Image (tube, helix red, strand yellow):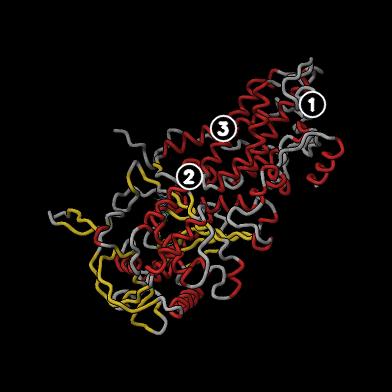
Amino acid sequence: MLRTSVLRLVGRTGASRLPVLEDFGPRYYSSDSLSARDDARDARAYFTTPIFYVNAAPHIGHLYSALLADALCRHRRLRGPKTAATRFSTGTDEHGLKIQQAAAAAGLTPTELCDRVSEHFQQLFQEAGISCTDFIRTTEARHRVAVQHFWGVLKSRGLLYKGVYEGWYCASDECFLPEAKVTRQPGPLGDSFPVSLESGHPVSWTKEENYIFRLSQFREPLQRWLRSNPQAITPEPFHHVVLQWLDEELPDLSVSRRSSHLHWGIPVPGDDSQTIYVWLDALVNYLTVIGYPNAEFKSWWPATSHIIGKDILKFHAIYWPAFLLGAGMSPPQRIYVHSHWTVCGQKMSKSLGNVVDPRTCLNRYTVDGFRYFLLRQGVPNWDCDYYDEKVVKLLNSELADALGGLLNRCTAKRINPSETYPAFCTTCFPSEPGLVGPSVRAQAEDYALVSSVATLPKQVADHYDNFQIYKALEAVSSCVRQTNGFVQRHAPWKLNWESPVDAPWLGTVLHVALECLRVFGTLLQPVTPSLADKLLSRLGVSASERNLGELYFLPRFYGHPCPFEGRRLGPETGLLFPRLDQSRTWLVKAHRT
Ligand code: ME8
């Protein structure tokens, strides 16, 4: 509605144009991952997280992956109806030697262990507001059908053969390793044992007759795919790493294990003596979710974005696209890769006893607080270190003081007694900078603020496209600081509503600050959904006015009507984000030596 009337107005009055997102180029509206061929396909987007092993309870790293996917997906949904057909799947990876061994060690059957831990993941994701549309468990019957069908396709295309595989196998990582990737680690009794060079997990020597996939045939097709899709793997350094791996020889891959050794898995169709390799089983989950092998899956594939940790890059960027190409399908559109959370500089591990429980964090810091922390501090390109003081410091400074303080300053009864969105006065704040006149009150810094906030949605969208959500939040936070500076500079608490000289400017200062808050609230929805809802509700912004496509910042400045002007604010619901107590007992203290 607003958009139509605004556009008519532009033609009629010649007023300056409102900066809306589509002004910043068609890329914003077209899907980030699709090539805008036809509307129906363009409208679909399918996001996935890894499916997580059920050998241990979830930790903050698992939650981080799910949050990144959730934020990407929520941001995409906010772009408007054309891009609203979004699917988002997560789940648990329940087969394989690792699970078989973990169940035995816990004195449980594999099914008992899987049910217990999968439930744990589901509860965590529900509590954390992960807006997934699908949760898959690889022990489901529909998945067995999909995997066995996929296997049949590879077989019928001559890509599987039987051969003897001899080499190192790492059960923790569920992968085969060449000699060069194995080292020896000193044991407790002065002996030594072989471990994976990359993960440090123990490996054992295996010699078996297995089914083998002709991976070596796919080296060149994979190189071509990556070279012609430079955004396939984001951020770029990971794309580069995969291309480097492909410079080396790509041996064929064993894709089954002897059932006598690995019984907890999906049998090879027509050969019960072999169980399908857990990674082939796991990767096919992305197809199972969208209905494979039924034709319906084609409406979602390959409009897919996989969100993964760097530890499983090889499986997603080499094995998976090779399997797909082998089965006559396209590789996924995008693979977004992130690095790891460490704790006090160390890898999180059960044996080190430093695993951070995400549910405790959600309770302690609130769901929105902890979501904000992980997404604001997590940098995909590098590992990030966790400790509690960092969380408290960040949330107090950015959510409680800066954002909450700004809202309070503009809505408190003392300053805004009518509890409305006050009118914007164009003579106090003319759209032309540098004008002088008795009623002009805006200063150069105020124009800089308007310009920063006007371009913020586009900046944020670009950061989402590049999988740099922390940069999007950094940009919002910087604009919040700038807006606080604006309010501080004009000190509305020193202006008087009763004075005919002060009142239009006082209203304008509050109007501008509320407009900035409206933009911040709208942009924060993918990361802190409840907090953004609270903020936007307090501003009186209705649910239908929260889409990114409708985000017109400060229309009065650009000579257009503002639907919020004169509107009553929403009800007061207390502090936006109460400050956290610094003296709480820590889960993880900063490491000081
Ligand atoms: O690899 N920091 O499952 P998994 C950040 N089942 N993210 C982390 C992390 C950390 N310290 N630790 C784990 C598997 N992750 C397979 C996947 S997919 C078809 C099969 C996240 O339980 C990150 O996303 O070991 C990583 O890739 C994933 O959890 C590995 O989870």
Q: In which quarter of the image is ligand 1?
A: bottom left
The number of numbered discs placed on residues in the rendered structure image is 3
For badge 1, the amino acid type reads Thr
For badge 3, the amino acid type reads Ser
Circle 2 SS class: helix
Q: Which mark is nearer the camera, 2 or 3? A: 3
Circle 1 SS class: loop
Is 92 situated left or right of 569 in this image? left
Residue under numbered circle 1: 426
| Mark drawn on residue 460 | none
Q: Do the residues labelled 2 and 1 touch (CB within 8 Å)?
A: no
Is 586 situated left or right of 21 in this image? left
Residue under numbered circle 3: 478
Circle 3 SS class: helix
The answer to which of marks 2 and 3 sits earlier in the sequence is: 2
Which of the 4 image quadrants contains residue 261? bottom left
Is 407 situated left or right of 93 in this image? right
Residue under numbered circle 2: 374
For badge 2, the amino acid type reads Leu
Q: Do the residues labelled 2 and 3 touch (CB within 8 Å)?
A: no
Pick the front one: 434 or 3: 434
Is residue 222 positioned above or below 274 on the image?
above
Inter-mark Cα distance, 1 to 3 = 26 Å
- Residue under the point 60% across and 40% down: 459
